[in-house]
Image (cartoon, rainbow, N blue to C red):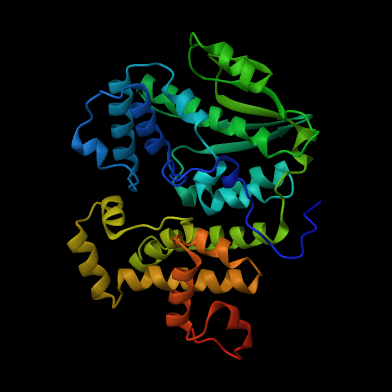
Amino acid sequence: MVSSDKSPQIMNYDSIKEQDDRFEASTPLTRLLMLAGQKNADMTIDDELLKIRGQYMNYQDYLAATKALIKRLGTEDCGYQVGRSFEFSNLGVLGHAMISSATLKEAIETYMMYRDAFGAVFPLTLKADGKLVSIEADIKSDDPQISRYLAENWITAFSKLAELVSDPYGLPFAAVHFAIKQPDYYQEYEALFQCEVHFEQPVTAMILYQEAMEYPLKYRNFGVHRLCVNECEFARRMLQHNDNLSHFVKAKCYQAYGTFPTIASLSKTMGLSERTLRRRLTAQGLSFQKMILDAKMKRALNYLQNQLPIKEIAHILGYGDVQSLHRSFKDYYGVAPGQYETLTEIKQK
């Protein structure tokens, strides 16, 4: 069952908890930084750690920065606290593909299919066994602090699946397994999931009822889901061409939702200086700013053709207001957004 709306609209899941910094908590690491600020207002964090806020990072840098922050906080429940701050919109266009899915099964399968293109830290496996479905996390780390943090952050974050399910359907969870020692606050998990929670298991896993996989979602919308999945697929295809710099940059542009990568964030991800990245792009006849603009305008046109409201398009593409999007679109295509359908052919730049 899907929404009966004739025109796709981006779900108001973000607006349930309106806040000016809704794009700030875009990754587990930035949410960990926020936790550090909340719990330790006077805690000194060196400049190198502060520079990671909102940046793309490689895997080793991510683990190193995470460990440093956990050490500074000095509390065992960092993963739990960071997971509690998660919203599916933090996953960008992938999160909105999940939110707009028709059923819980479609949301989970969408996540499993595209998560690698959005910075997955560890692999997941989806298994069906009779009346149960399990999502198993292969978390491998020699550091017990990191293992605990990754397991608790992921499990706690995905307790939010229950919030996507339409009323009056019940909680979808049958059991939760952790491959870590039982913490003092284990009862928090029992209250959160309202099911059996077991520690020191062979694998960390979330176990759901098979029948729950067919539960309809509150914000289901076929048109939005299709658009978001298309952009996820484009990002995945671009990342498969990992020998091609332009494909990598394009993938990051199509992953973005609300905030777009900067030359500084991309160069850090790739282990390059900004100057080197610019030089390599120039050698291929590419301009970083033009690639960002091209991605935004092609996405804007796609959204208009699928009848998304102009206000929502501006929100998705990171424009502060509709007027800014209107000016960019007209400069790029030569017509205002409301006039695009009158053209027999729109020049693709």
* Residue farthest along the bottom direction in this orientation: 344
Judged left or right of residue 238, residue 134 is: right
Residue 129 coordinates in the image, percent (x, y): 74, 30
Residue 29 coordinates in the image, percent (x, y): 38, 36
In percent of the image, x 53 and y 43: which residue is there?
18
Q: In this view of the protein, can residue 112 be seen by the observer?
A: no
Judged left or right of residue 39, residue 45 is: left
In percent of the image, x 23 and y 75: which residue is there?
283
Q: In this view of the protein, can residue 172 be seen by the observer?
A: yes
Q: How many dots with numbers?
A: 0
Residue 301 coordinates in the image, percent (x, y): 55, 74
* Residue farthest along the top direction in this orientation: 184
Q: Which quadrant would the C terminus be assigned to in this image?
A: bottom left
338 vs 184: above or below: below
In percent of the image, x 28 and y 33: which residue is there?
64
Q: Nearer the viewer, residue 260 or 283?
A: 260
Residue 25 coordinates in the image, percent (x, y): 43, 40
Q: Quadrant of residue 61?
A: top left
In percent of the image, x 52 and y 69: which residue is there?
299
37 vs 250: above or below: above
50 vs 301: above or below: above
Q: Nearer the viewer, residue 187 or 21?
A: 21
Q: Quadrant of residue 43?
A: top left
Q: Quadrant of residue 342?
A: bottom right
